[in-house]
Amino acid sequence: MLYDLELGIEYEYDAPSDGARNLLHLLPLTLVGRQTLQQGVITCDPAPDERRDRLDFFGNPVTEVSWHSPLQEIRIHLRARVERLVTAAAPMDLSPGLPDLARELAGLNDIGPRSPHHFLAPSPRVAPNAAMAAYARDHVKPGATALEVVLALGKALHGDMTFDAEATDVDTPPATAFAQRRGVCQDFTHVMIACLRSLGIPAGYVSGCLRTLPPPGQERLAGADAMHAWVRAWTGHEGGWIEFDPTNDLIVGRDHITVAYGRDYADVAPVKGVLRTAGGQESSHSVDVIPVKTAA
């Protein structure tokens, strides 16, 4: 499936800011056999005084930008064309049970960017939590494979938590979202990561975009698509990594466009940085994921 992706983020400040410096995780990844970034460009208005494009530790494209003059507003724009190859078919279950998964991890010496060892320990936004660990244990059937545990936990959280855009904000701890059983995709994802890690299953955060379909008979609304998040879990040497969307209770498929992999949101926030300013600020964002019609 071929998509044109457009994303816009705007910041307006009550007073001119000074010394703004940001890290942008916006450019989609190229993943062999699954997703290809055919073209993509990030622009900023006003143009930054400094810019550097590089890869971070996990192999994600990251753009560093900074401004030396006072700013009243910043507009960031991404335009990209992405081919998404993967389907949502359930994978063959080649994963071991949890005791054997632990033995596989113990024998794994790799500590490179894709190593599951990075996704098992506490991370900036996901800490051990007794309530989530107990919830996770309650949803593990005796003898279940690692893949079965991932799917069962994702389905359980989808059923027990309510999507509520007003219940949390970007800084809400996963324990709070879990306690109230409400939140957005970031919360569903962080909670599921905490649950999986408590069982010894390495799990990380995937930042991306999701194509949304309008109700039958209605037109797409420009900007109605959204930045999204889901879980990536390691199910052993044979099972490999599986990506699951607990917000929608499904294995990630061709409507999910991957932007960045990290341990949690802190590693892959679309915009992260610092500035000096006084007063408040307003921000807005829009995302369009548009299927490209190709010749038959």
Image (cartoon, grey):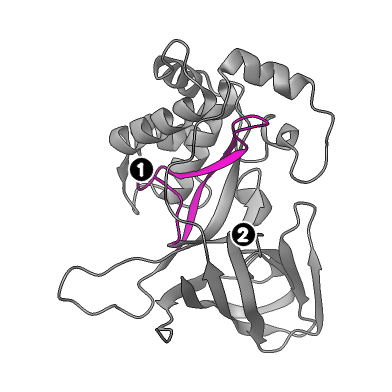
Q: Which mark is residue 234?
A: none
User: Going by the picture, which residue comes out furthest to the top?
Assistant: 142
Residue 166 visible: yes
Q: Give residue 49's position: percent from left, percent from top.
A: 80, 85
Say if residue 280 shows up in the picture.
no
Q: Specify the amino acid type for callout 2.
A: Gly
Residue at 71% of width from left, 35% of height from top?
Answer: 116
Q: Which residue is mark 2?
A: 33
In depth, the one of 52 and 215 nearer the eye is 215
- Marks 1 and 2 in Cβ contact (< 8 Å): no
Name which quarter of the figure residue 269 lies in.
Answer: bottom right
The answer to whether 225 is drawn above or below residue 174 in the figure is below
Three-letter amino acid code at the position of disc 1: Asp
Picture quadrant where residue 199 is located: top right
User: SS of the residue at dot 1?
Assistant: loop
Q: Which residues are magenta?
A: 227-254
Residue 155 painted magenta: no
The image position of residue 192, as x and y in percent, is: 48, 35
Where does label 1 land, which residue? 249
